[in-house]
Image: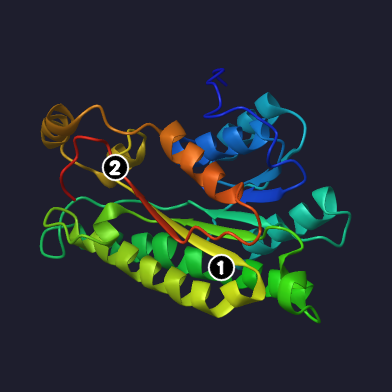
Amino acid sequence: MSPVPSASPGGTLSGRIAIVTGASAGIGEAIARDFHAHGASIVINARRAEKLEQLAAYLGSRVAAVPGDAAEDSTITAMLDTARTKFGGGTREADLIIINAGRGLGGTVITSDISQWEEMIRTNVLAAAKLIRAAGQRLLKEQEGKQGEALLDRARDIIVLGSTVGRHVSPFSSMYGGTKFNVHGMVEGVRREIGPKGIRVSLIEPGFVVSEFQGVAGYDDAWLKGVWDRIGPVLKPEDVARTVSFIAQQPPAVHINDIMIRPTRQDYP
């Protein structure tokens, strides 16, 4: 692994147990690196086992790799169980869940490749919903019997990566944007449901971030270069990771619900 520096070194997440999906590259990898630099213990997940193991070996201590499809129930259970047994002493659950795994798709409802719709919806919507549900249920069980300020004995976070196109309708990616609209509504609903029980649920909506995402989504290279030239420099994964860590570092009684982050010159979406 290349020695990319963490977004903001420190130790302010010491004692936290994190899960990061989509951690083999891009934003997920940057979040894992930043959390590790801040002292968290981390379970990292992605489909590409080899790259995941390389990151775990590079980071060294306080990291466990659980490769697999983030939409599979068995993978979700393995992530949560590994966090509890390896870092939580067999009883304490992961308290910093980052739902980052996702995929894009170029084109609109009219023009995009319909053969990729189901896989994108499965990854972006169903995988997110399943992990929110599974992690939320475990964290709620930890809170049983507590009342008032006792619910805030420590920070508990579920942080979901959305997109600016999930809030601002984009004519060039309406099918992908539709999945993020879904996720945004789901996150806000869960925030209202379990926030009063001491579990923070936050949404981050990045604009253009340079990563593998654009290639997987199938965006036209000439179009993408034109966008980069017009609004650049675009965000780096470390910029988003720094923002995620900022949310997680807040005192238990402070809940940052939603952050939109764009390159300075990005006007839309």
Q: Is residue 16 visible?
A: yes
Q: Are marks 2 and 1 in contact (CB under 8 Å)?
A: no
Residue type indicated by callout 1:
Ile
Q: Is residue 138 visible?
A: no
* Whether residue 176 is situated above or below residue 225 in the rendered picture: below
93 up-or-down from 105: above or below: below
Image height of 188 relative to 78, above or below: below
Sequence-earlier tag: 2 or 1: 1
Question: In the picture provided, is 251 more to the left or to the right than 269?
Answer: right
Foreground label between 2 and 1: 2
Quarter of the image holding residue 69?
bottom right
Q: Percent from the top left, x then y, of residue 180?
A: 33, 62
SS at mark 2?
Answer: loop
* Image position, residue 109 (x, y; %): 16, 65
Per the image, the residue denoted by label 2 is: 262
Amino acid type of disc 2? Arg
Colour approach in the figure: rainbow
Rendered residue at 58%/64% (across/down):
200
- What residue did someone put label 1 on? 132
Task: Please state, as top left, top right, bottom left or bottom right, where the N terminus lies in the image.
Answer: top right
Regarding mark 1 in the picture, which secondary structure is present there?
helix
Total labels drawn:
2
- Residue 219, how many percent across, how many down? 20, 42
Which residue is located at x 11 percent, y 59 percent? Answer: 111
Instruction: Name which residue lies at 82% across and 49% down.
Output: 86
For the view shown, which residue lies furthest in the top direction? 3
Left or right: 96, with 99 as reference point: right
The local crowd at label 1, few if under 14, some if 14 to 19, many if 20 or more residues have their Cα within 10 Å, is many
